[in-house]
Image (cartoon, rainbow, N blue to C red):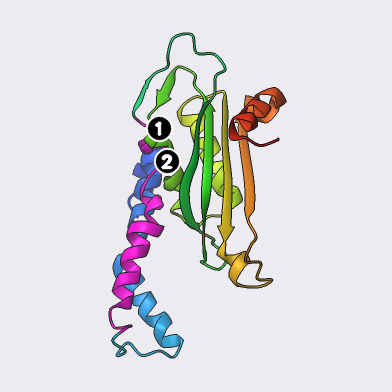
Amino acid sequence: MGNPRILRQLPRGLRERVDLAPKLNRAELEAAVASFLRAAGLSLADPNLRDTPRRVAAAWASEFLDGYLQTPEEVLRETYPAPEGNGTELVLVTDLHFHSTCPHHLLPYEGRAHLAYVPSKRVVGFGRLAAVLDCFAHRLILQEELARRVASALAEQLESPATACILDAKQACLRLRGHRQPSARTHVEAYEGRLRRNQALRRELWARLGAKP
């Protein structure tokens, strides 16, 4: 895990990456999947399961948990000067597809995200907004926390006075187990700064989204 004294001296974003990266051990993931299959009474001699541990470990390491190997500081590092005369105008990107995994049952959820911020001195490329969403979504994280972490990262990294993350998703936990509600959708909102306090600005956001606050 590295020298704790040295880690404390690193910038927070780099410290997080150094601390988390060694935990993602693909070989151990593969062994754990093999143990899970055997514990379920299944044989790895089955031709359909023989290579499953390797495939599952690769998918989790590179697609479902790779968010742990990134930080919002890195993702949002490259910015550009905000246009002159910018005041309270919203920058809004809608219908970003995302997928994540619930930490309670390790079941997936996916849906659409709408991200908004009011620029201060800097703006960021639109693709970077999708990247910061994936930075947190590709972890084991509740939908509520995901929205909060994204809104907070935009506020902190872009020094934005107003940010929002709105997530509309389909949760496998709710649709496939327990009460089994196949049509259910879950909606979560998180606001920072003026979008949290200013109802008029929030109404403007929802007007652009074509919905009522």
Residue 8 seen in this snapshot: no
Residue at 32 percent across and 89 percent down: it is 46
Quickly name the residue at label 1: 126
Give how far apart the Cα atoms at labels 1 and 2 are.
Answer: 7 Å
Name the amino acid, label 2: Ala
Marks 1 and 2 in Cβ contact (< 8 Å)? yes
Tell me residue 23's x, y (percent).
37, 59
Tell me residue 29's x, y (percent).
35, 70
- Closer to us: 192 or 95: 95
Q: Quadrant of residue 61?
A: bottom left
User: Can you say whether 82 is above or below 22 in the image?
Assistant: above
Residue at 36 percent across and 90 percent down: it is 43
Q: Is residue 62 magenta?
A: yes
Residue at 44 percent across and 86 percent down: it is 39
Tell me residue 115's x, y (percent).
52, 36
- As drawn, the residue found furthest toward the front would be 210
Mark drawn on residue 130? 2
Q: Majority secondary structure of the magenta segment?
A: helix
Residue extent of the magenta highlight = 48-77
Name the amino acid, label 1: Phe
